[in-house]
Amino acid sequence: MATSKETVEVLLTESRVFMPPKELVECSNVKRWMEAHGIRDLDELLKRGEDLEWFWGEVAKEFVEFYSPYKKVLEWNPPHAKWFVGAQYNIVHDALDKHQNTWRRNKVAYIYEGEPGEVEKLTYRELYIEVCKLANALKSLGVKKGDRVGLYLPMIPQLPIAMLACAKIGAIHSVVFSGFSAMALAERMADAEAKVIITCDSFYRRGSKIPLKSQVDEALKMAPSIEKCIVYKRTGDQIPWDEKRDLWWHEIVKDQPKFCETERMDANDILYLLYTSGTTGRPKGVIHCHGGYAVGTTMTLSWVFDLKDEDIWWCTADIGWVTGHSYVVYAPLILGATSILYEGAPDWPEPDRWWDIIERHGVTVFYTSPTAIRMHMRFGERWAQKHDLSSLRLLGSVGEPINPEAWIWFYRHIGGERCPIMDTWWQTETGSFIISPLPITPLKPGSATKPLPGFSAEVFDEYGKPVVNAGGNLVLLTPWPSMLMGLYKAEERYRSTYWEKYPNVYLAGDIARKDSDGYFWIQGRADDIIKVAGHRIGNAEIESACVSHPAVAEAVAIGKPHPIKGESIVVFVVLKEGVKESEDLRKDIRLHVRKEIGPVAQPDEVWFVDALPKTRSGKIMRRVVRAKILGMPVGDISTLSNPEAIDELTKAR
Ligand code: WTA
């Protein structure tokens, strides 16, 4: 039989089980916790985790210090939960303040490496001082508890410093990924009604300087709530300046005291808003609070990645996304870990930049995305082989399903077949890992394994019945401490998006399969969200960007499987009357979307058609377009008013 070697390998690897190394299990944080609580094995731990109040109460004792005790672990009034009800708390107490009284104040919190190569080490003491100074400066500008502050910064230490400074004084930060465009920034700032924005002149990426301040200037024309713009000098580039509005970071912190009292918040007060794509054109502001978020993120990091004081932790995610918020900033700081912060591109100046960083700084635990792994796979393992990666002891993956080939490559060539891979499934909304292995869990490549203790996930059919060995909707059955507390100024959308399909059950929006061993296999999004290189982009967002181009009348955007990025963006557009199709116009539409949303959303393909398939009520049938382009059955098209438009799609390409 003519079967290629690759297919055989896929088949073999999918059924393989990797047992965790014995010494890892024996010394793991989770094992220690189990022993302290008289728990014998993983099954018993999962069982004990079903008693949410007991379990999370015990966990909280270990990881956080409330200013005043809570009255109740959980108050669940679906679809709203409150955790650690009645406690006074501020996450900055755990992330920074408490370390100042221990030996940890002189431990390195961040090893920062700029793309040009400079390395800077910031201890917990130094970080604390920087945060206090900026917090005092924000106060002097009139920023108060509950005010929103926009942060538009790259991967430099000033981003965590700014987040912590906001949180310290009880202000709410809203970080916007520095790869987003001025338009996307403006939309988010306007929705959050931010008072102040913090940015930098420009930063380094692939050897060039990427301007940020000029983007902010453009955005602020559309975000009238912003009164002040604080600018950190990163590259020293010449930038436009508005004397009345703009302030240099170094000038406003210069004479500030090195101490700033941390605001005592309610555990359920808002820590941050983070905008993420949904199924409509407008991104939604996911709300996370101080208390539960601190407990959920810290326990999951400690148990899943087993961080110890000697570890050097590197989560490569940009802080502009939730992974960076939870696992580059808050949880590692609460654990008192040392983290790597790297400004630049993974393959700059050569494809071995990451492996070089791991070797030079002795990284022990490394967490990245399937897209990045596939990109390095394409460069080839020779780049990793040039470096001594023996410091690594655990690996991790997040953001999209990891295909078994990429899993095996990562395991073999980066982890030297010693390091288990923690494939963590979670979302902006969940705040922390939900389905993930622990170091004691046998692994199946391509599966995120089982819900962690204290979490409860299922796969439901359309009627809300659990299904095994069949695709269905991934749902979460019980509340969890780091869950979103709502959507900013959008209660109805919160209820209808997550809690309506199955009453009082959280609908994740992913399709998954649970196998006979209870392992979960995530198959991708069920709704209209595309995952490009792990970045979450709504089809509707791309479409509305397309139709804002003067030549475009209608548009539909779909995601198409891509060997490296997971998915790529394909757009079909109907041009306005009298507009001529041309190569230049195609290019222009791609650039227009890039300008409207950001480089991550730039379509890979733009095709011209005379009509798009529509229902009789005039709704574009995205599902039909997608099926046709992917060569799948188009399904029920009885509601279609113009079936001939379907064939046009394939002709256009
Ligand atoms: C996807 C990122 C498969 C999923 C933390 C989810 C994953 C969406 C995994 C959330 C994983 C995340 N395996 N798919 N390990 N992790 N996803 O909000 O579709 O940017 O719903 O949060 O990413 O994306 P978000």
Image (spheres, rainbow, N blue to C red):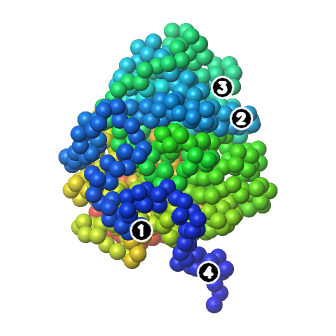
| Marks 2/3: CA–CA distance | 14 Å
| Front tag of 4 and 1 | 1
Q: Are marks 1 and 3 in contact (CB under 8 Å)?
A: no
Q: Which residue is mark 1?
A: 41
Q: Quadrant of residue 389?
A: bottom right
Q: Nearer the viewer, mark 1 or mark 2?
A: 1
From the viewer's side, name the closer residue of 66 and 435.
66
Sequence order check: which comes first, mark 4 or mark 3? Answer: 4
Q: Write the residue at 64% across / 76% down.
A: 6
The image quarter containing residue 425 is bottom left
Observer-nearest of 582 and 637: 637
Question: Badge 4: how crowded within 10 Å, few (<14), some, or many (20+)?
Answer: few
How crowded is the residue under tag 2: few (<14 C-alpha within 10 Å), some, or many (20+)? few
Residue on which the image places disc 3: 234
Relative vertical location of residue 243 with respect to residue 64 in this rendering, above or below:
above
Question: Which badge, 1 or 3, is on the more N-terminal residue?
Answer: 1
Residue pictured at 48% horizontal, 25% vertical: 165
Furthest residue toward bottom: 1
Q: Is residue 501 above or below residue 469?
A: above
Which amino acid, by three-letter code, is at mark 1?
Answer: Asp
How far is disc 4 from disc 1 in space, using C-alphas? 35 Å
Q: Nearer the viewer, mark 1 or mark 3?
A: 1
SS type, badge 2:
strand
At 39% across and 77% down in the image, what residue appears?
A: 516
CA separation in Å, label 4 and label 3: 50 Å
Q: Which secondary structure lies at badge 3?
A: loop
The residue lying at 23 percent from left, 39 percent from top is: 71
**Residue contact between numbered discs 2 and 4, judged by CB atoms under 8 Å:** no
